[in-house]
Amino acid sequence: MSAGRSDLIDISVVLVHETERAVLVDHGGAETVWLPKSAVEIERDAGGRTWTVTLPERLAAEKGLL
């Protein structure tokens, strides 16, 4: 048991494209990454072009975001 520890992490990204079911983000890596909207929360950072994506750490690792 994790004693209340969340497995969610926040990553700053640039939103490249959005569809009904997914977002394409640039996280500063070699390639852009598609993330399913059903598994993430995405919020625009105040006054900027960047967004904060909140997602499970496992998904971030699978997508090469860590």
Image (cartoon, helix red, strand yellow):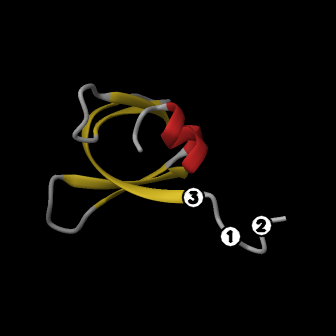
Which residue is the site of mark 2?
2
Marks 2 and 3: which is nearer the front?
2
Marks 3 and 1: which is nearer the front?
1
Q: Is residue 48 above or below residue 40?
A: below
Spatial CA distance of label 3 from label 1 is 9 Å
Identify the amino acid type marked 3. Leu
Quadrant of the snapshot with the C terminus: top left
Identify the amino acid type marked 2. Ser
Which residue is the site of mark 3?
8
Mark 3 or mark 2, which is nearer the start of the sequence? Answer: 2
Give the residue displayed 46% in from the left and 34% down from the top.
35
Q: Which residue lies furthest to the right in this view?
A: 1
Which label number is shown at residue 5? 1
Tag 2: Cα neighbours inside 10 Å, few (<14), some, or many (≥20)?
few
Along the horizontal axis of the image, is 59 left or right of 46? right
In percent of width and height, residue 34 lies at 41, 28
At mark 3, the secondary structure is: strand
Give the residue displayed 85% in from the left and 64% down from the top.
1
Camera-side residue of 63 and 42? 63
Camera-side residue of 42 and 8? 8
At mark 1, the secondary structure is: loop
